[in-house]
Image (spheres, rainbow, N blue to C red):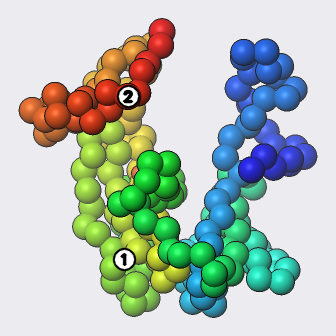
């Protein structure tokens, strides 16, 4: 869904006939369909850093997380008729949503407070080479990732910024599985 927002300072991505003033600036937020919104509203409000007012309209609740003004909106929509989503069946299903926690100290504090509030379905720190993350199962079912990408890692930790996106890079611990992984991606083509 495209969302219009006045004053979004993020620079858009023009190209392929799309001019700068019509370019998409970035992610606005995410929508989650829920059987029961109440526990999810409590979770985001009490421990997952909701800021400002929660606006509620019918079976939709909207609010933002963290201090940024753009890119961090959550829309919770009550839905008792569709089956719950699953990433096991069907390509194109979202597996999780990642939040940028900026630095490892902040990330650790957040993990500690979420876990301490009783949401114990949260992983230990996973070192993905390019980023480090905890993953927490929210009471609504959606998986949230607490990620830090710029400290002790980063997308350019094993190649220069100019080279990004030209080769299929893997963390060293998965390099021995390259052929298998590439085989699973054979339908995806990358053009120069
Ligand atoms: Fe992720």
20 shown above or below 84: above
Q: What residue lies at 37% left-to-right and 65% top-to-bottom? A: 135
Task: Decide which of 19, 130 is in the foreground and name it.
Answer: 19
Sequence-first tag of 1 and 2: 1
Q: Residues within 10 Å of mark 2 (few under 14, many from 20)?
A: few
Q: Residue furthest top?
A: 192
Q: Secondary structure at mark 2?
A: loop
Task: Decide which of 144, 118 is in the foreground and name it.
Answer: 144
Question: Percent x, y for residue 82?
Answer: 60, 75
- Quarter where residue 56 is shown: bottom right
178 shown above or below 134: above
Q: What residue lies at 40% left-to-right and 27% top-to-bottom? A: 188
Question: Percent x, y for residue 80?
Answer: 63, 84
65 shown above or below 80: above
Left or right position of 44 against 141: right
Question: Percent x, y for residue 165?
Answer: 43, 21
For label 1, the residue is 112
Confirm if mark 2 falls within 8 A of ligand 1.
no
Mark identifier at residue 166: none
Q: What residue lies at 33% left-to-right and 74% top-to-bottom? A: 122
For label 2, the residue is 187
Task: Decide which of 39, 46 is in the foreground and name it.
Answer: 39
Whether residue 53 is visible, yes or no, is yes
Q: Residues within 10 Å of mark 1 (few under 14, many from 20)?
A: few
Question: Percent x, y for residue 94?
Answer: 49, 56
Q: CA distance from mark 1 to mark 2?
A: 41 Å
Dots 1, 2 in contact, CB < 8 A: no
Left or right position of 157 against 192: left
Q: Nearer the viewer, mark 1 or mark 2?
A: 2
């Amino acid at each position: 869904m495209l969302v219009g927002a006045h004053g979004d300072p993020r620079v858009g991505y023009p190209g392929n006939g799309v001019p700068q003033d019509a370019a998409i600036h970035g992610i606005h937020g995410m929508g989650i369909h829920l059987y029961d919104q109440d526990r999810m509203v409590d979770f985001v409000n009490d421990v997952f850093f909701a800021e400002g007012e929660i606006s509620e309209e019918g079976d939709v609740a909207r609010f933002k997380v963290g201090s940024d003004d753009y890119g961090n909106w959550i829309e919770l929509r009550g839905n008792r008729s569709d089956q719950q989503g699953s990433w096991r069946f069907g390509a194109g299903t979202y597996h999780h949503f990642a939040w940028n926690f900026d630095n490892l100290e902040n990330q650790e504090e957040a993990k500690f407070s979420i876990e301490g509030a009783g949401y114990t379905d949260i992983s230990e720190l996973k070192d993905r080479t390019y980023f480090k993350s905890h993953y927490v199962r929210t009471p609504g079912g959606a998986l949230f990732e607490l990620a830090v990408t710029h400290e002790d890692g980063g997308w350019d930790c094993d190649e220069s910024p100019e080279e990004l996106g030209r080769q299929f890079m893997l963390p060293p611990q998965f390099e021995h599985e390259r052929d298998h992984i590439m085989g699973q991606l054979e339908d995806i083509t990358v053009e120069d």
